[in-house]
Image (spheres, helix red, strand yellow):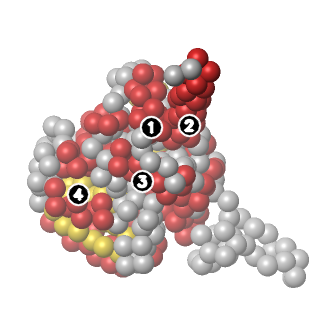
Amino acid sequence: MSRKTKGALIGATLAVLTANAAAGYYFYRTAFLRRKASLQPEDVDCPAHAGEEGSATGNPATVDPFAAGGTNPVAGAGAPDEPELALSPYEISRLWLASQDALQTLSQHSSDNLLLKAKYLPARIPSNRTAILVHGYSADALSMAGFAQHYHEVLGYNVLLPDNRAHGESEGRHIGFGWVDRLDLSLWIRKAIDLAGPDAGIVLHGVSMGGATVLMASGDPQPPEVKAIVSDCAYSSVWEELRWRLKEDYNLPAFPVLHSATLIAHALTGRNFRKASALAQVARSHIPTLFVHGDADTFVPFEMVHRLHRACAAEKALCVIPEARHAEAWDVDRETYVKSLHAFLDKHLAG
């Protein structure tokens, strides 16, 4: 082989390696660092995707002029020819939560010394039942306001809504994808038990990344006060979900981009996200779990819920919401969702 040919091959190899490294670094920055709306902006992990980029910073979502559910309560009468903007149900619940006089902000430090924050709303009538509501990727605590309103107003629970690390008011640069967040969640569980008092009963309810968080927590030893888990549209593992997003959003295979991105994340955080498996965790769980998923979900593929449900070693139930896309089950068919949720909670948190 001539020196010129060898030089060309070496140059081509270096170009390929550089391009792969650059692609891996780009995906690492897109997926793992805070204040990214999502892998695709329309796929923010909060109910009905209503939060969009504002949720990542804790700002209120923009008003949806096409949503059902009454007129804008903060808008003036305006000129006769100006249509009133309607608030989405998500925004109405968010405003409801923010307006509660009893709403508190709680703080504590993670095991790696990040300041974590959460919202806490005690029940109107003192209760030892608490729902810990865990939000999705690039959302925030207030994005779970619809669930908070139901647990508080209808079921009479205390509600605790953490901001995951690298989200909302909590510190952190790297997103935990549920794997790291499950460790932070254990701190909030202990806080909720302390606040609820003797004979506390805790339900963990998460959406998307929050669903993965509560499932990943289920495989770790938990206090006996944790009575039930509700997982809404969770992914089976971080690796499988990121591989799926690479294919769907960029038409790229996992190798070498995802391998490079996770290696960078591992080097910078010390966390091996290839081990971050909700499937493996639920196989060790003894906590009764309700799985919820919309059958039109293509962001976290619908088939994942069936694999999670089959793998779960604990007592379990499955609620499928027809025609619901990602994180939309609560809004698409609330009647079915509520019926399944109440039956599940009546069984496992009665008394």
- Few, some or many C-alpha atoms within 10 Å of disc 3 (few <14, some 14-19, many ≥20)? many
Mark 3 → mark 2, Cα distance in angstroms: 16 Å
- The mark lying in front, picked from 1 and 4, is 1
Q: Residue at x 16, y 61 (%)?
A: 310
Q: Earlier in the sequence, mark 3 or mark 1?
A: 3
Residue placed most toward the observer, 24 or 256: 256
Q: Residue at x 79, y 79 (%)?
A: 83
Q: Quick check: marks 4 and 3 in contact, CB under 8 Å?
A: no
- The mark lying in front, picked from 3 and 1, is 1
- The mark lying in front, picked from 3 and 2, is 2
Mark 3 → mark 1, Cα distance in angstroms: 14 Å
Amino acid at circle 3: Trp
- Few, some or many C-alpha atoms within 10 Å of disc 1 (few <14, some 14-19, many ≥20)? some
SS of the residue at dot 1?
loop
In the image, residue 167 above or below residue 80: above
SS of the residue at dot 2?
helix
The residue where tag 2 is placed is 23
Q: Quadrant of residue 181?
A: top left
SS of the residue at dot 4?
helix
Amino acid at circle 1: Pro
Q: Residue at x 75, y 67 (%)?
A: 75
Q: Earlier in the sequence, mark 1 or mark 2?
A: 2
Asked whether residue 151 appears in the rendered view, the answer is no
The residue where tag 4 is placed is 308
Q: Quick check: marks 2 and 4 in contact, CB under 8 Å?
A: no
Q: Earlier in the sequence, mark 4 or mark 3?
A: 3
Mark 4 → mark 3, Cα distance in angstroms: 17 Å
The residue where tag 1 is placed is 256
Q: Earlier in the sequence, mark 1 or mark 4?
A: 1
Q: Earlier in the sequence, mark 3 or mark 2?
A: 2
